Amino acid sequence: MKKLALLITCVAVALSASAIVQSSGNAYRPMDKLQHAGKMKAPSRVDIITEQPEGTVVNYTRGGEYMTVSLYGYESAYQTGRVKLVYADDGQTVYIQDPLCYGEGVGAWVQGQLSDDGLTISVPLGQYVAYNDEYDYGLVLAWGSTMVIDLGDDFYWLDFYADETKTEVCYAVDPENGTITMLDSEGSVDNPYPYDCEATGLAGVWSDDGTVATIEWGSTWTVMGETVPAVPANPEVTDFFDSGREDGFTRLDFNINLFDVEGNPLNSDYLTYSIYVDNDELFTFDYDTYGANNGFDTDMTEIPYGYSGYDFYLRRVYFYRTNEGDNPFFTWRIGIQVHYTVEGVRNSSDIVYLEVYEPSAVSEMAGGKEVSAVRYFNMAGQELSQPQGLTIKVTTFTDGTTMATKVIK
């Protein structure tokens, strides 16, 4: 509860755009809690399937578009990542893991039905993809549309309208091309923000008040090819927060790109990541501190992608230490490196850092290195031509190393 209260306070930041988007009702709920609930034993009354069902497993890469709503405001982007399907031996039942790209890594399965001709999959709506017993609400599959209402003074209301006449979402199966495509959805991430961010498609709504957390459309899943060794693309470090109390916590926010350096999709089952501080010092999540709360029985320096526990989430890690005081666990930068291990071959990305303290340390770290490129990204991960508002500056050196720093313009 302590983390939740502080988290809600900390993420209430202004958008880099001039307009502010408010979601209908209390749409913001930290997915953190629900990822934890999905991985642990969820209440049986909501029938969440957490164990992989029996049958033939097929991995697909995600395509399409999606929108999320949070205290950050409205964000839309192209879907990435992997979705896993299990075709049961009865030839009719299909199970889909994490049908919403927003919830990838939660690990919950929903059940669907394959048509007699094998060309359509129907998934009943109303299935939970996550549930939190402590707070008594969860994320439910629904179908509907979003609409933006102009409130004036650069404020907009993002509303969601559920289509209660629709009881299932349908996907067309193309065996020849190895694709599965959502039917009847529409929208575009290329529409001007935020005026035309309407969309119709599969949504995740909160069970207690029906407000929307995410909606996706144009979803197309393509059979993933053979898993072979590859060099993973560099991750992104998006934020760091320090509670500033000796009995508090710190947290690192990041994004792991699910493709290799050549743009080919990666199978997230083979991805891990490590945390580094200061001068490439590997951080250890020791058993005595983290083991009991997070379900591991030894010290860990590599965390599996999507690993979930009390302190580990899909795009966030908590630490039981503050950097304020006499015993900081790093003094000026923190970073992440991604590993991809297939058939005993382990390849790693660069270590991508976020400089948190003492900006003058940037020149010291560079140590005479030659800069080859500088790129800017907003908090949604979109590349910018120049800094705008709160921006992440990514500097690439000629030796291949990278460094990420915050810029406020």
Image: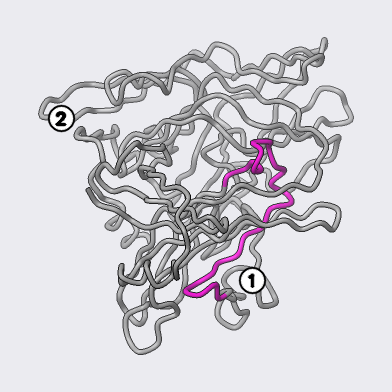
Quick one: label 1, few (<14), some, or many (20+) residues within 10 Å? some
The reply to whether the magenta stretch includes residue 137 is: no
Q: Which residue is mark 1?
A: 301
Residue found 64% across the figure and 71% down from its top: 301
Q: Is residue 270 left or right of residue 78?
A: right
Give how far across and how far down residue 350 sits, in percent.
59, 57
- Most extreme residue toward the left is 153
Q: Residue 308: name its quadrant.
A: bottom right
Q: Which residue is mark 2?
A: 154
Nearest the camera: 51 or 44?
A: 51
Nearest the camera: 403 or 226?
A: 403
- Determine contact: label 2, label 1, CB under 8 Å: no
Give how far across and how far down residue 34 sits, in percent.
51, 50
Q: Which residues are magenta?
A: 257-281
Residue found 37% across the figure and 51% down from its top: 393
Residue found 83% across the figure and 37% down from its top: 226
* SS class, disc 2: loop
Q: CA distance from mark 2 to mark 1?
A: 45 Å
* SS class, disc 1: loop
The reply to whether the magenta stretch includes residue 263 is: yes
Name which residue type carries label 2.
Asp
Residue 231 higher or lower than 77, as above or below:
below
Residue 178 higher or lower than 287, as above or below:
above
- Most extreme residue toward the bottom is 326
Nearest the camera: 119 or 316?
A: 316
Give how far across and how far down residue 395 sits, in percent.
43, 53
* Marker disc for residue 120: none
Name which residue type carries label 1.
Thr
